[in-house]
Each structure stands twice: as structure tokens, then as C-alpha cells.
């Protein structure tokens, strides 16, 4: 089956997903593009060999749609696609808050359409293998996670997403728009969270848009994580992460880039370092990834987040990351903002 694909939104993130589409073996054809800017829609459509069409026409012509607009439009567009039986890949964050995100997950499930959310860190070999290491009984108890994420504020350079400082379109700032990736991956790797404490700042002066967020996450297993998320003006620094994880008998270091190594050391053993295709091969050997998913990049590799989505449409296989999987991260982000706004610790359970 050739999956007919459409894009609702033709900006930076749409171009990123088109790059992944070019590197998947799953049979597909991009047939339609819509954007509120007709010139941008036409330019993207010409690039991918598709037609620039209206929103309604696009949903009539496709089997699957990528929702790559600003956040405020996500819920409406996901509902429209679900109502027409069209599979949906929605970018993160799903919505401004978890209540809206739950409605979106409900809508695609009631409609019975294949759906996926764009939390791409779960497809990085570094994080996949780190999760396996933490599950190793030799690691012992999780003690602490230090997670720093910084990037230049994405209203400039190759992002050019000026809507990200308009709270009516994006909701909030760096924690929601960017570090929902980080909150999701920590929950996924380290387990459920009991409580959170947060501090946010708006140093660029955009009302409602945090550009510094610091959060403490206390895990149910007794571990604790600190997350620092920053939007600065150093254009020479793109999206960069630095992650250190300490267990009783295990140290892990990574930065979540396809070109970067994963370093780990068990007590009494020498440190080990893997990167690129060698690291991906470890993931194959562990049975947590398929080789056809691998996307080579200069100096490294990652797994294609779109292959499983397209396969699910063509074969009926489960989606690798349905919208409902994002709800944990949305609850945590909501809780961090609530903590920061009220100057109190927010309990997640009980």
C-alpha cells in the first residue's frame, strides 16, 4: 500500500519530517500541502512534488496527515482529520495543557485512526540504550538525574518561528514548547513522578513566554531529577542537551545528539563508550529497534520516527508512539507551571 501523505503546515518542522520521509523504506507519496501562507505552501509543495490545496481538499485526498502548525491549531486539525478517518501525526506539544491533549487522544481513539506524536527523543539510540542500562539489575537504585537543555530562542536563524513568542499560538515558552521532550524522556526512562517543583523566568520580556525553566522531579522510586531549560540568544548554540544519570552502581552520560556518544560505567568495570552505527547496533542486538528504521546522519545515526507510523497505516500494526503516550509529559509540564505560578510543590499521585 502506498500511503498518501499530506502536510497541514509548511514551516521548519514540516521540512524536518519530509527529511525523515525521504529516508524511510515505507511506501508513501506526499500528495498535498496546506499552509495559511499560500506562497510557503506552494514552495513546499513544489519541493516535495505535491499540490498546494485547501485544508478540506487535503483531508479528502490523503491517508495520513502531518499536523505541523503552531500549537493552538493542533486540536482542531487533529479532530478534523479523525472525523474523516485520516491517520494523524501531530507535533509536540499536543496542546496548551493536558485537558486539551486528553480530548485529542480521545478523538483519534474513538475514530479508530492510527496516530502518533512527535516526541523524537524516544527514537535516539542514546536514550534507547540508556533506558536499557537503567533497567539492568546491576545498576541498583536510581539516585539522581541532571538534565540541561539549551537552545537559542527559536524566533531567529533557521527556525524563524516568530509565533513561539505569541502565547495565543504557542501557550507558554521553553518548558512546554521545547522541553516537553525532556520531561517525556525522563518519565519514560526513570519511571513515574511523585511530585514536582518549578521556577520560571521571562528574561526576554515576552509576557507569558518562559525562557528559563528549572524543575525538580521526585520519582516514585526515590530518585530525583533537576531539569534546566534555557532559551538564550547565542545563535551559535543550536538545540543542545547534557544529561548525567547516577545510580548506586551505574553512571551514564549523553547529550541526545545523533552524532554524539553514550558513555556508561558499572561499578568495578571500565567505562564504555559507543556512538553512531555501533551504538545503533547495540539497540538492534537488544531487540528494541529495526535496522530499516535507521537514518544515517554525518557522524552518527538515529531511528526513523516515521517508519512505524507509515507501517501501522499500511499493515494495521500498532503505532510506535500514539498521542496518549504524551499525556504523562503534559501532566508534568502543567504541574511544573502550576508550581512556579503558586510557589509550591505539586503532588502528582495520591
Image (tube, rainbow, N blue to C red):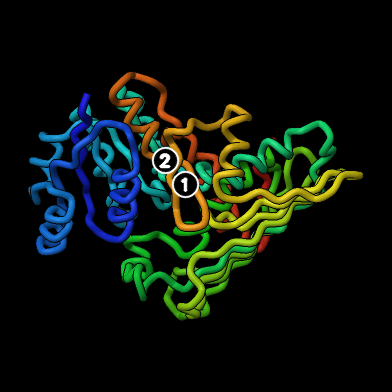
User: Which residue sits at x=80%, y=48%?
Assistant: 265
User: Which residue sits at x=73%, y=43%?
Assistant: 219
Helix, strand or loop status at disc 2: loop
Mark 1, Cα crowd under 10 Å, few <14 / some 14-19 / many 20+, is: some
Instruction: Classify residue 102 as left or right of residue 46.
Output: right
Q: Cβ–Cβ below 8 Å for labels 1 and 2?
A: yes
User: Which residue sits at x=20%, y=28%?
Assistant: 2
232 in relation to 126, above or below: below
Q: Quadrant of the C terminus?
A: top right
Instruction: Classify residue 312 as left or right of residue 350.
Output: left
Where is mark 1, residue-wise? 120
Q: Earlier in the sequence, mark 1 or mark 2?
A: 1
Where is mark 2, residue-wise? 305
In the depicted view, which residue is nearer to us: 317 or 345? 317
Q: Quadrant of residue 164?
A: bottom left
Q: Position of residue 43 (x, y in %)?
A: 14, 60
Instruction: Classify residue 185 as left or right of residue 75.
Output: right
Amino acid at each position: 500500500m502506498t500511503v498518501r501523505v499530506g502536510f497541514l503546515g509548511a514551516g521548519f518542522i514540516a521540512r524536518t519530517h519530509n527529511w525523515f520521509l525521504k529516508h524511510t523504506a515505507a511506501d508513501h507519496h506526499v500528495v498535498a500541502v496546506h499552509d495559511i501562507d499560500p506562497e510557503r505552501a506552494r514552495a513546499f509543495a513544489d519541493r516535495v512534488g505535491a499540490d498546494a490545496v485547501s485544508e478540506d481538499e487535503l483531508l479528502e485526498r490523503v491517508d495520513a496527515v502531518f499536523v505541523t502548525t503552531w500549537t493552538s491549531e493542533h486540536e482542531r486539525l487533529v479532530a478534523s482529520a479523525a472525523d474523516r478517518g485520516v491517520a494523524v501525526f501531530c507535533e509536540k506539544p499536543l496542546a496548551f495543557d493536558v485537558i486539551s491533549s486528553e480530548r485529542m487522544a480521545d478523538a483519534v481513539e474513538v475514530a479508530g485512526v492510527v496516530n502518533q506524536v512527535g516526541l523524537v527523543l524516544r527514537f535516539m539510540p542514546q536514550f534507547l540504550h540508556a533506558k536499557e542500562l537503567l533497567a539492568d539489575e546491576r545498576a541498583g537504585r536510581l539516585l539522581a538525574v541532571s538534565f540541561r537543555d539549551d537552545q537559542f530562542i527559536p524566533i531567529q536563524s533557521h527556525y524563524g518561528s516568530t509565533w513561539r513568542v505569541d502565547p495565543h499560538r504557542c501557550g507558554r515558552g521553553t518548558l512546554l514548547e521545547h522541553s516537553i521532550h525532556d520531561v517525556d524522556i525522563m518519565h519514560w526512562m526513570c519511571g513515574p513522578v511523585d511530585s514536582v517543583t518549578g521556577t520560571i523566568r521571562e528574561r526576554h520580556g515576552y509576557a507569558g513566554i518562559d525562557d528559563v525553566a528549572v524543575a525538580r522531579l521526585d520519582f516514585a522510586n526515590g530518585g530525583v531529577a533537576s531539569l534546566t531549560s534555557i532559551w538564550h540568544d547565542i545563535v551559535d548554540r543550536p538545540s543542545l542537551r547534557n544529561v548525567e544519570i547516577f545510580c548506586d552502581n551505574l553512571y551514564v552520560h549523553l547529550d541526545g545528539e545523533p552524532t554524539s556518544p553514550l558513555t556508561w560505567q558499572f561499578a568495578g568495570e571500565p567505562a564504555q563508550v559507543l556512538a553512531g552505527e555501533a551504538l545503533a547496533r547495540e539497540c538492534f542486538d537488544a531487540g528494541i529497534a529495526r535496522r530499516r528504521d535507521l537514518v544515517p546522519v554525518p557522524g552518527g545515526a538515529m531511528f526513523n520516527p516515521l517508519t512505524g507510523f507509515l507501517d501501522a497505516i499500511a499493515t494495521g500494526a500498532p503505532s510506535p508512539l500514539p498521542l496518549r503516550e504524551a499525556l504523562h509529559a503534559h501532566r508534568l509540564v502543567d504541574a511544573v507551571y502550576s508550581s512556579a505560578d503558586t510557589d509550591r510543590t505539586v503532588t502528582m499521585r495520591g
